Amino acid sequence: MSTLVARAETLAVDVECSGDALCVTLSDGRVVSVPLVWFPRLAGASTRERSEWELVGGGIGIHWEAIDEDISVASLLRPENFMRLPDKALQPPARKKRAAAERRSR
C-alpha cells in the first residue's frame, strides 16, 4: 500500500514595497526580496498603488488592481522558470567572476 503525501505550498502572507524592492513574507517565515525593476508596472506605480495589493488564491499570488499586475509566489522563488531576466542576473557568483575574468583576458 502506498501513501500519497500532499505537497505543502508556500503562500504569501504579507507584502511590502520600498522604492526599489518588493518584499513578500511567506507562510513558512521566509521573506523574499526582489528588485522592483523585475516588474516594470510595479516599478512605475505610485506608492499608493503599490500599497493597494491583495492576495489571490489563498496566497499563491499577489494582485494589484490599479496597475493590473499579478505576481505568483512561485515566480519569486524560482524567477529563472518564470521570467526573462538578463543572464548575468541569474548566474551563481562563481560563474559571474569566471565570466568577468574571461572578458578581461580577451
Image (spheres, rainbow, N blue to C red):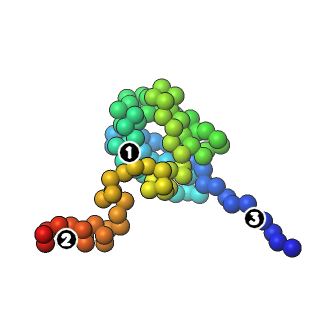
Q: Secondary structure at mark 2?
A: helix
User: Where is residue 39 shown, x and y percent of the image?
Assistant: 40, 41
Q: Amino acid at mark 2?
A: Glu
Q: Are marks 1 and 3 in contact (CB under 8 Å)?
A: no
The residue singled out by tag 2 in the image is 102
Give the distance between the C-alpha atoms of the residues marked 2 and 1, in whole angstroms. 27 Å
User: Where is residue 48 shown, x and y percent of the image?
Assistant: 42, 28
Residue 52 in view in this figure: no
Q: Quadrant of residue 94?
A: bottom left
User: Where is residue 8 shown, x and y percent of the image?
Assistant: 67, 58
Q: Residue at x 40, y 36 (%)?
A: 42
Q: Secondary structure at mark 1?
A: helix
How busy is the neighbourhood of tag 2: few (under 14 within 10 Å), some, or many (20 plus)? Answer: few
- Which quadrant is the N terminus positioned in? bottom right
Residue 16 - label: none
Q: Earlier in the sequence, mark 1 or mark 3?
A: 3
- Mark 2 or 3, which is nearer the eye? 2
Q: Judge by depth and name the residue closer to the eye, 24 or 75.
A: 75
The residue singled out by tag 1 in the image is 38
Q: Residue at x 37, y 51 (%)?
A: 85
- Which quadrant is the C terminus positioned in? bottom left
Q: Judge by depth and name the residue closer to the eye, 68 or 62.
A: 68
Q: Earlier in the sequence, mark 2 or mark 3?
A: 3
Residue 42 in view in this figure: yes
Residue 5 - label: 3
Give the answer, above or below, for where 70 lies relative to 79.
above
